[in-house]
Amino acid sequence: MAKKLAANVPPNGAHAIDNIPNVFLLDDDKIYVRLCAACGSWYKNHKQKLSSDPDLSNAAQLNEYEDESHGFMTTNTNNMPSFGTIGISDAFMQDANFLPEGDAVSTLAKLKVSYDSQDAFIEGLSSFMEEKDNHDYSEDKRLIEADLILTHDVVLDRSDSTNDDQNMSQNFKIGDVCSRADRAQQSMVAGQLRNDIFECTGYFFQLHRVLDANEDGCKFYFTCSRHASKDRQDEKTSQRYQLHAKDYYSCSGQVVISFSKANQFLTIFYKHRCHEKVINIHPPENVRKYVERLRGIPPRLIYLNMIRDAGTPLLESVDVPLITRRQVHNLWASMTQSAWRRHDKDDYLSAQILLDETVDYHLIEELQEPTVSLGFTTPFMHDRNLLILSEIKEIMVDATFGTNFHGFELYCVVGIYRYETVPLSYLLLDTRAVEENGKRGIRLTTWFKHLTLLGLRPSVGHSDKDFAEIVSALGVFSLCNPSYNHHLCLWHSLRAIDTYLKTRFKEGDNLRSMINALFVTARPKHLDFLKDKETEDWVLSNGSKRKPTLKETRVIRALVKRHLLSSPSLPSVNLDDNMPTSGMQFSDWIDILTACVHEILDYCRKIDQPAIFRYLYLNWYRPSHNDYRGRWEIASLSGRRDVTPVIPLSRTTMRLESHWKLLKKDYLSPFVRPRVDLLCHVIIATLVLARINRLKQLQCNREFPHMYHDFVKLWRKCSLAVEESTSFERESVFHTDRSKWFCSCRSYVMNSRYICKHLVSFFASESGKEAGRFIVSPPPRFHYQLFQHTSPLVSFDDSTLIGKSVTSNGGDADDLEDSLDSVDFLKEIQTFDLGQDENPDANEQDDEQFMKIREIFEWLSSDDLAKGNGKMQRKIKGYFKAPEAFIKDFEPIMRESQGKSRSSQTMRNAAAGYYVFRPVSDSRLNNAR
C-alpha cells in the first residue's frame, strides 16, 4: 500500500528518473515515489529489490500507479501536474522507446490519454487487448493494467436497453451523469461500461461493491467472474466452486469505475492476468425481444415457451440451451421494475406511492406507520360495478409470513360474495419493535373500524385461534351488527386437538387453570353436574399415566367434530339408525352445550384421561360466564347465546389459505423475500386482478362457483347410496324435511354442503328402479339463491319461500363512528382469561428461560470453551431430547439466513420453517430504533 507524503514536495534522498516526469527513486532502489495525476499528492511504493542494472524499463515494469484506496478522482485541479489529466501510466508511455520487448509488455497499458466517444473507447481497448492479451494463462505472467478516462463529451448508447423506463432507455452523456451524482443512473452507466469491457476483452466482471466515497461521486468495484479468490477456495460448503475449480484462475481481475462530479469525467482502472476467454452467453437481442413480448407471464413459463419455440423465426440463430432460467428471470425482472419501483432505497415509501396512484386502491391513513404497518383497501370495497358490499355476510381474516424482505405479517380480509371469495383489504403489520400493550390488537381494531365505516356489515366471521383477530373482530363487527358471530376454523381446531393428543399430551399440565375455571370463571348453573364431588375429584386427578391409543384419539376427534358442528338452527343428530323417533328434534343453546360436555366427560372418564378433558373443556367447551368470555361461543356453530345463529357457508378458512397458496406458490414463487413495493404490485397486478376476472366470469355465467361443483359431486355420490331402506329411514327414523332441507342423520350435519342420501332420495324415481338401484334426477341448476345461511339451507326453485336476508343498517354513519370509538381492545381481551399460549402479545416477547440459554451458549461459543472437550459436548447434547430433529429443522433456516444455502432460490423451494421464523432486515430494525 502506498504511503502519502507532503503534497508537491519530493522526499529527501529521491532522485529523478530521466524521461519520466514526476517519478523519483530513493537511494536503496527499493522505493520510488510519484506524483498522483489526480490530486497532486506524492506517494511512495515499496518495491522488490531491483535486478541487475535497474534501468528505466525495469522501473517502469514495477509501476503500480495510484493505489486503489486513493482512487483516480480529480479533487484539486490547482495541484494538477503539467501533463493535465494524463494518468501516471500515460506519463510512462509518452516516450515510445520506453516500451520493453516481449512478455514484459503485459505489465503496461498503452492506451490513449482520454476518449471523447464510446466508439473510440471500444476501438482503442479492443485493439490493445488483441495485441497484448493472448488468453494463455500462467501464474507467472504479470498483470495487464490500464487507466482510462472518458471525458464529459462521451455519450453512451443505451438504444439496446430492454427496459421501458425512459431514464434507462435514453443515451447518457458522461458529463451529465457525473454532475447529477445520481447513484442509480451511475450504476446503469457502470453496468454498460462493464458490458463494453466484456466485449473488448473477453472477460466478464461482476459487481463486488459500491462505495459512496464522498460527494464527488460513486466508485463501482467489479471482480473477474473467473477469479479464484481465497475465500472461494476455502469455502467447503460451496459445491459449485469445488465442481468447477478448473474454470477459475488466480487472475487478480478487477475493474474500478469512478465518477467525478467536480471535473465531470469518468475514470476506469483495469487490472487483469490473461486467461481463457469467458464464453459470451449473454442473451442476444432477439431473446430480449422474446422476453419483452411475454413479460406479462411468470419467467418460468417464458423459459418453457422459449424451449418450445427454439428454432422458430422468433428465436432465429439462438442457441437456446445456452440460455439459462436465471437469465430469463433477470431479463424479466429488469423489464418489469418500472411497473412497481417508485423509490430505489425506501420500498415502504415506494409501495405507498404505488398504491396511491393505482385506481380504486386506497391507503388507510391510520395504518401508515413506517416499519410497523401499511394498510390498504382493494377495488372490491369501492367499485359498485363489481359487487354490492351490503350482500357480503361472511368474511374471513388471517395472516401469513414470509412474503417480504422486512418480515411483515400480511393480513387479509376476504368476503364471500355470491359464493365466490373476494379480497377486500390487506394489512402489512410488524409490531415486534413496538413497546405497547395490545400493540397488534389495537391496529387490527383500527383496521376493522375503517372497513366498517366503508359499509362492511358481516354476520359471520372466521379465523384461526389468534385472539388478537378474534377480539378485534368481535368488538367491532358485533357493534355494527348485533347478530354477528365469530367462529374458529374447524380445520385449525381439529388440527390443534390432534397435535395435543399425539405430541403434547402431559398429565396435569392444565390443572391450575381448570381449578380456576371450575370455581371462578366458567361454571354456569347448567354445568352444575361438574360440581358433583366424585366428578370434581376425578377431573382434578392425574388419572391414567398412559397416552391415548390411536383408536381413542379417533373417537375423541369424531366426538369433538360433531359437537363443534352443533347449532340450535340445525336438527339434533339421531345417533341410532335403528331407533325411530317421534319427530325431528331441535335443542336450544344450553341443552346442546350440556349434552356435549356430558358426552365428552363420560368418554374421558371411560378411558381415565382427566388431563384430556381438562384441555378440551378449557380450550373448546368452556362457556362464557359472568364477565368472562368462553371458548364454546367461538369454537362451535352455536355461537353466542343471545344471538340466533346463522349457518355459515364455510366451516374453515380454507378459502383464505388457498388465497395465500396462490400468492406464495404461484405469483411470488420467482422471488425470495421481495421488497414491499414488489409485493404490493404482485397483489394488485395478479392476485386481485385474477379475482376480479373470476367474478366477472361468474356474472356472465361462464363459470360456476366451486361450492356448486362440490355440491354436484356430493349429489351424485349420495345418488349412488340410495336404496330401498332409504325411504323408511327418511320417513320414520330421521324425519327428513324436504321443504326446510333438514335431516337428523349424522351425514347431513357432517357434510359441508348439508346433503345426504335421504334428501336426495326425494328425487329418486321408483318406477325407474333397476337391479335394486334407483334412478335419481340430476342435480339442480345453479342460481344465486341455491345456498343460504338460514332454512332452507339449499333451495332449488324460485317458488320456495326463501325470504330476504336481514341487513342491519347500523344507524347513521356519524353515530356509528362515535360508537366504534368506544371499542377498547385492551378491555375486551381481558374478558377472555387468556393463557400464556393464547396471549397475542406473548408471541412477540422474549422468553426469559430461552434468553438465559442463549446467553450461556454465546458464552460457550465466544471463547470456544467446549471446543475439543468431548465430555462437555456430550453433556450439553444430553439436554436435547431430539438433537437430530433440532438440527434438521433449524440448520436449513440458519443456512438460508446466512446466505449459504443455494437450494432455496425461490419461495417455492424455501425451507419448511422459513415462513414461521420471520426474517427481519437490518434496515427495518435500524429505522425502528
Image (cartoon, rainbow, N blue to C red):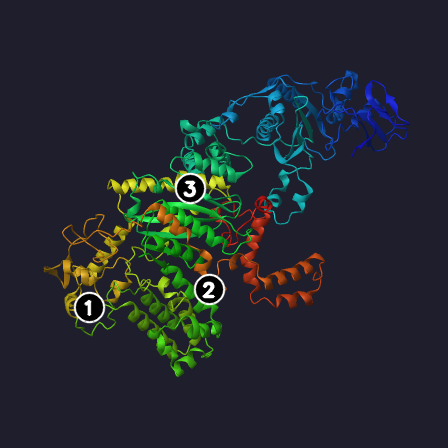
**Mark nearer the N terminus (1 vs 2):** 1
Q: Amino acid at mark 2?
A: Leu
Q: Alpha carbon of mark 3 to alpha carbon of mark 2: how far?
A: 35 Å
Instruction: Give the number of the mark in front: 1 or 2.
Output: 2
- Residue at screen point 55% across, 51% down: 434
Where disc 1 sits, the SS reads: loop
**Tag 1 residue:** 584
Looking at the rendering, which quadrant does residue 376 occupy?
A: top left
Q: Is residue 707 left or right of residue 468?
A: left
Where disc 3 sits, the SS reads: helix
Q: Please identify the quadrant where the N terminus is shown.
A: top right
Where disc 2 sits, the SS reads: loop
The correct choice, above or below, for 218 with respect to 891 in the image is above
Is residue 657 visible in this depiction of the protein?
no
Disc on res. 834: 2
Decide: few, some or many residues near mark 2? Use Cα within 10 Å; few <14, some 14-19, many ≥20. Answer: some
Residue 151: % across, % down: 65, 19
- Residue at screen point 70% across, 20% down: 111
